[in-house]
Structures are given as structure tokens and as C-alpha cells.
Image: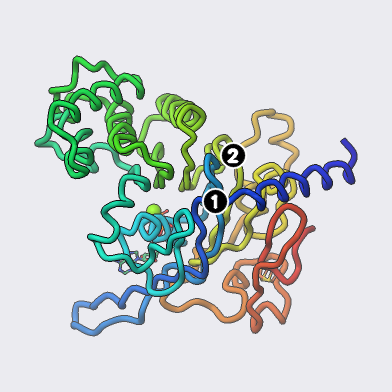
Amino acid sequence: MTETAAHESDAQETAVRESAPALLSVQDLTMTFPGRRSVTGRRGAPVRAVDGVSFDLAAGQTLGLVGESGCGKSTTGRMLVRLLEPTSGRIAFEGKDISRLSPSGMRPLRKHIQMVFQDPHSSLNPRQTVARIISDPLLVQGWSASDARRRAAELMELVGLIPEHIDRYPHEFSGGQAQRIGIARSLSTSPRLIVADEPVSALDVSVQAQIVNLMERLRAELGLAYVFIAHDLSVVKRVSDRVAVMYLGRIVEIGDKKSLYENPQHPYTRALLSAVPLPDPAAERRRERIVLLGDPPSPAAPPPGCTFHPRCPKAQPICRTERPLLQPAVSREVACHFPGD
Ligand SMILES: Nc1ncnc2c1ncn2[C@@H]1O[C@H](COP(=O)(O)OP(=O)(O)OP(=O)(O)O)[C@@H](O)[C@H]1O
Ligand code: SF4
Ligand SMILES: [Mg+2]
């Protein structure tokens, strides 16, 4: 395909996506935590963990959310499922603003929006049987105990577990099986959106692919949408339609997976991708690694201007004073004064 044709095809894909109604629409989402108290009792500066995050997600699609530790991925995910109330901003699910709903206001929507956690064993109650763990969300929704148990057995089968093991306890399962239980629980109420926060990072590499395949199959069969949070860019590439790259609480680049991976525009995205191992050893030897200096700054004291400037190999004087906003580029948006090569 020529470059022009590729751009036209990207533009058509973008137009189709934009004409589809958003299942989830997030605008200017912000979370500021109060500063933690030191040993002397003094409170530190407030932590702006998420700072003006916006994106749309269509039904049946996956948005991958990536970035270094502490950039605000989990905080974003927890706001989306309303385990946390945003400091400001708007989260609309199927057009309804859910960002300020009380727990009772959220109850009817809970069944549509579920979460899968990183550590399957610590997210499952060790004193509950699998039957109880999977059927609990159904009992909350008013199902009878016998119907909920039957549904739990069906879900075990759907996620590749043996339904006869329904009365076992979490410790009787391996990590991968425990994550299947977590996924079955999240599916019990037939949600339309699942926020998966590092769902495979705690698992052995050999098991990760099985869980990713399972999630892909369930998405296709059940028409689910995922917000898939991970620091492993290879996994995100596999599962996502679109990818958002976060740095210090903000999205710095967001766009179609293919164009973002093939032609990253933000220096931070380029650095992250340059660290992903290539399958071809010769290509791996030839490729240029962009090594980022130091750690990300604290979100309690973000640098002025572009918050990436102290680590950016392309930084110019304007980067130290003017914050770059997300600007449309081909098939994506980028927050950088000097995007591209
Ligand atoms: N309850 C809290 N109180 C104060 N600060 C918090 C709280 N929860 C998170 N933070 C801070 O907010 C920032 C974002 O944290 P978050 O857990 O969202 O990052 P993350 O991208 O999920 O990181 P990781 O990849 O390590 O899971 C971090 O600086 C973290 O220390
Ligand atoms: S705005 Fe400047 S410092 Fe920030 S990423 Fe772009 S070039 Fe680097
Ligand atoms: Mg996290």
C-alpha cells in the first residue's frame, strides 16, 4: 500500500470509529490525592496522579493504556469503574454521566462495568468458594442462589475451568486458573466494559498468552470492550485497537495501534517502543535503543512546561515553559512541540 493509500485507509477507519457511538467517553479526568503525612506528621504536597485525561472507547473495542510505573494507569482505571471518585472531569457510559453518581446511583450500572485485577489470588476472597466468588455479583443483582450457582458453573466452562471444581477455594488453583476465576467473576453480570489492570503481569510468561487468548476470544464472542492496562507493550500491541501512552498523569500520545507502533510521534513513545525486543535477532542487533535518563519526576512536584522535558532527548527551550497540548496528527493525537523524527 502506498503512503497516501495508507493514510486514506487510516482516515476511513478513524471516520468509522468516530461515527460509532462511544460506549465510554472520558473528558478531562483528574485525580488529586492529598499529600501523604511524613513521620513528623506534616502533610506533603497534593499528588496529581491523573491530570486531564480524555478519550473515547467504542463498544467491542480495546484501548490499551501504557506507561511507566506511577504514571496514573491504575488510578485512571479505578475512576472508570468508580472505585474512586474523580476530583474533576466527566466519565460518560453510554451517554450517561457516571462521574458523580453515589454508590446507590452506581448500583444499576455496576453490572455493565467490571474490573479484572493484577494479582488474581489477592483479589479473590480466600474464604469463599469459587461458586460464591463468581455468583456474588449476581446475588447482589437479585438472582436466586440456585440460578446464580448454575450461571457460575456455565461461566467456569466459558473461561476454561472445570465446572466440577465449583466448590473449591482459591488456594486450590494455580495463578492462571485464579485469573480465570477473576475473569469469570467479572463476566457474571454480562458487562459491556471491562477495565483490566495488568491482568497478566503477575502470571508466568507461559500462562500469560493463554489468558490474553482467553480475553481476546471472550471479547469476540461477547462483544466486550476493554480498557487494558499494562506496562508490557508487546501484550498491549496484541490486544488493542487503540493505544494511549501516559506520562506523569497525562496522555502524551493516543491513536490507532498500528500507526502508533509503526510510527511513534512522541519522544516518550519512541523510547518505550525502542526497548521492546524484536523477534528477529538481526533486526534486534541493528536497532537503536533510546535510553531514558533517570526516573519520572514525582507527580507531587511536576516540572513546568512539558513534564517530560528533563528526560527528553529532543527538548528545546520552549519545552521548559510551555505545556504542549494533545494535537491531532494522522491517526492519532500527540502532546509534543516537536513530534516525529
Ligand atoms: N491513595 C493514594 N494517595 C496518594 N498518592 C497515591 C494514591 N494512589 C496512587 N497514588 C500516587 O499516584 C500516582 C499514580 O499511581 P498509579 O497507581 O495510578 O500508577 P500506575 O501507573 O498504575 O503505576 P504501576 O505501573 O506501578 O501500577 C503515583 O505517584 C502514586 O504514588
Ligand atoms: S514537548 Fe519538548 S520536551 Fe516535551 S516531548 Fe516534545 S520535544 Fe520533548
Ligand atoms: Mg498500576
Q: Residue furthest left?
A: 127
Discs 2/1, front: 1
Q: Is residue 79 above or below residue 89?
A: above
- Ligand 1 picture quarter: bottom left
Residue occupying image coordinates x 34% and y 42%: 116
- Tell me, for residue 237, which label it has, or none: 2
> In the rendering, at what x and y percent does residue 7 appear?
83, 47
**Distance from mark 2 CB to nearest ligand 1 atom below 8 Å:** no
Residues at discs 2 and 1 in contact (Cβ within 8 Å): no
Scheme by which the image is coloured: rainbow
Q: In this view, does 130 lie above or below 291?
A: above
- Tell me, for residue 57, which label it has, or none: 1
Q: Which amino acid does label 2 sit on?
A: Lys
Say which of 201 and 152 sits in front.
Answer: 152
> How far is the residue under mark 2 from the one under mark 1?
17 Å
Which quarter of the figure is the C terminus placed in?
Answer: bottom right
> In the rendering, at what x and y percent does residue 39 appear?
19, 77
> In the rendering, at what x and y percent does residue 175 appear?
29, 30
**Residue 256 seen from this side:** yes
Say which of 248 and 135 sits in front.
Answer: 135
Residue occupying image coordinates x 40% and y 40%: 201
Q: Is residue 211 above or below residue 18?
A: above
Is 232 left or right of 35, judged from the image as shown? right
- Tell me, for residue 47, which label it has, or none: none
Q: What element carries label 1?
A: strand
